[in-house]
Structures are given as C-alpha cells and as structure tokens.
Amino acid sequence: MLPLAWKLVAIVALGLAALACVLPVLPSVPFLLVAAVAAGRGWPWLERKLARHRQLGPLVTGWHERGALPRVVKATAIGSLAISGLLVWFSPAQAWLALVVDALLGAFGAWLWTRPSA
C-alpha cells in the first residue's frame, strides 16, 4: 500500500479511537492499534507521537515490541465488543446482518484474547 493510503488508514483509525472515548460501546483499543500499525508503515511522525504519549505510549510500544496487551485492556475491549454485539440485536438491522456482525466481533475478540499479556 502507498504511504498516503497508510496515512489515511491511520487518520481514520485514530478518529474512530477518539470517538470510542465518547461512545462507551465502541472499543478504542483495536482502532488505536490499527492506527499505530498504519502509522508505522506510512507515517513515522505519528508513530513516534503515539509511542511517546504519556498514557497510550506503553500500550503502543508493548504491541509493537511483543504483540502484547495488558489483561485489563484486553478484557475491556472484549467487553465492549460483547456489548456492541448485543446492541446490534436491538438495532433495525436484519437478523442475518446482526449474525455477521456478531461473528466478526466474536472472531476479533477471540483473536485479541489469544495475544500475549503485558
């Protein structure tokens, strides 16, 4: 992918992570990690900025170095995914779409839980 495309992915993911800070059912950790990975591939300035951040830096650095996340972060992210999956059923979405969304959220949650703990 071109560096410009990685920058765009980083911006969108960082924006979604920021939005997740306001919306309690939207998990911020996955979006933050996507932003960090995308920044590492196409926007070194943002990657350095994230790594040096007072609160986010250890999370991003641990992910880059060991692919590890603190247990509390994993549990919070998976809990948010579970709540989001439940809320889909109360939305006007059709049942097949709710099943697809829940399957994707569940698969991502399972993958996230298998990552090493920091």
Image (spheres, rainbow, N blue to C red):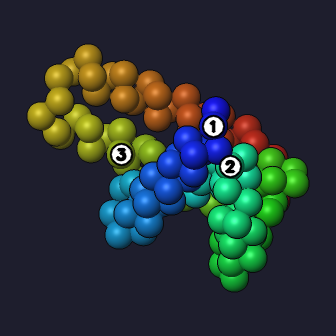
> What secondary structure is found at the residue carrying circle 2?
helix
Count residues near mark 1 (Cα–Cα under 10 Å), then give few for <14, some for 14-19, many for 20+. Answer: few
Q: Which residue is mark 3?
A: 84
Comparing labels 1 and 3, the label whose residue is closer to the camera: 1
Q: In this rendering, would 116 be left or right of 36?
A: right
Work out how far the residue at label 1 is from the one at label 3, CA to CA, in angstroms: 32 Å
**Cβ–Cβ below 8 Å for labels 1 and 2?**
yes
Residue 42 numbered tag: 2
User: Identity of the amino acid at label 2?
Assistant: Gly
Q: Which residue is mark 1?
A: 2
> What secondary structure is found at the residue carrying circle 1?
loop
x 57%, y 51%: residue? 7
State the image quarter where residue 26 is shown: bottom left
Q: How many marks?
A: 3
Count residues near mark 3 (Cα–Cα under 10 Å), then give few for <14, some for 14-19, many for 20+. Answer: some
- Residue farthest to the bottom? 54
In the image, residue 24 lies at what x, y percent? 37, 63
Q: Is residue 53 at least partly visible in the picture? A: yes
In the image, residue 29 lies at what x, y percent? 57, 56
Q: Is residue 58 above or below residue 42?
A: below
In the image, residue 105 lies at what x, y percent? 46, 34
Count residues near mark 2 (Cα–Cα under 10 Å), then give few for <14, some for 14-19, many for 20+. Answer: many
User: Identity of the amino acid at label 3?
Assistant: Ser
x 75%, y 42%: residue? 115
Q: Nearer the viewer, residue 97 or 33?
A: 33
Q: In this rendering, would 76 be left or right of 98?
A: right
